[in-house]
Image (cartoon, helix red, strand yellow):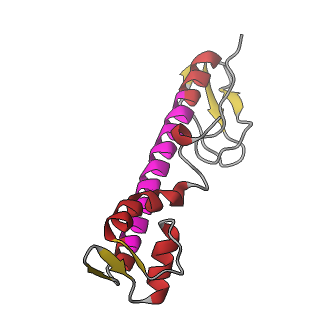
């Protein structure tokens, strides 16, 4: 039974092809779309295995990059939320937004009625990390998806 070829690790083309030298001693897989080539191996099975390992490694690297970018996105959103928080004033445990646009945005993102001007400071501070994670709601990480 021949192993199934995985898509090209560089361009994602779904139909790479097996190629051999004139004597059918060395085999390799190549992508007809971007021209990527797997290592030359003795036997078709070895060439397919080498190609598929490369494709698996590319998928792992891509997933790591996605997670890195998700982390950066949450960090940036957290910073933006805290910057909006810092445009307000806290007195006697109550946070008041001084700049309406920033305050209303922060209140809305944290789940408060943005028409109000005063909020419990502790509640705003506790809501910021949850609001920052909401940026991932469009495409949640695989481990956070619901079945």
- Front one among 22 and 59: 59
The picture quadrant where one finds residue 130 is: bottom left
Specify the principal SS of the magenta part. Answer: helix
**Image location (x, y in percent) of residue 26:** 59, 22
Q: List x then y, in percent, for residue 109.
A: 50, 68
Dividing the picture into quadrants, the one containing residue 83 is bottom left
Assign the C terminus to one quadrant of the image. top right
On the image, the x and y values in percent for residue 100 come to: 47, 88
The answer to whether residue 144 is left or right of residue 125 is right
Let me know if residue 37 is in the magenta part. Answer: no
Instruction: Quadrant for the N terminus, please.
Output: top right
In-image side of 107 versus 95 (left or right): right
Residue 88 appears anywhere in the view: yes
In the rendered image, the residue lying farthest to the front is 92
Q: Position of residue 37 (x, y in %)?
A: 59, 38
The verdict on residue 73 being magenta is: yes
In this rendered view, identify the residue nearer to me: 24 or 15.
15
- Please give the range of residues in magenta: 53-81
């Amino acid at each position: 039974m021949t192993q199934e070829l995985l898509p090209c690790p560089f361009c994602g083309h779904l139909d790479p092809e097996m190629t051999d030298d004139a004597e059918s001693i060395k085999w390799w897989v190549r992508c007809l779309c971007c021209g990527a080539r797997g290592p030359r191996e003795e036997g078709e099975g070895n060439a397919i295995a080498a190609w598929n390992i490369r494709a698996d490694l590319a998928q792992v690297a891509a997933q790591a990059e996605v997670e890195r970018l998700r982390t950066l996105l949450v960090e940036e959103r957290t910073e933006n939320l805290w910057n909006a928080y810092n445009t307000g004033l806290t007195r006697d445990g109550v946070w008041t937004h001084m700049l309406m646009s920033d305050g209303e945005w922060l209140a809305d993102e944290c789940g408060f009625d943005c028409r109000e001007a005063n909020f419990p400071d502790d509640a705003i501070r506790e809501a910021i990390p949850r609001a920052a994670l909401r940026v991932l709601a469009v495409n949640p990480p695989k481990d956070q998806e619901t079945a």
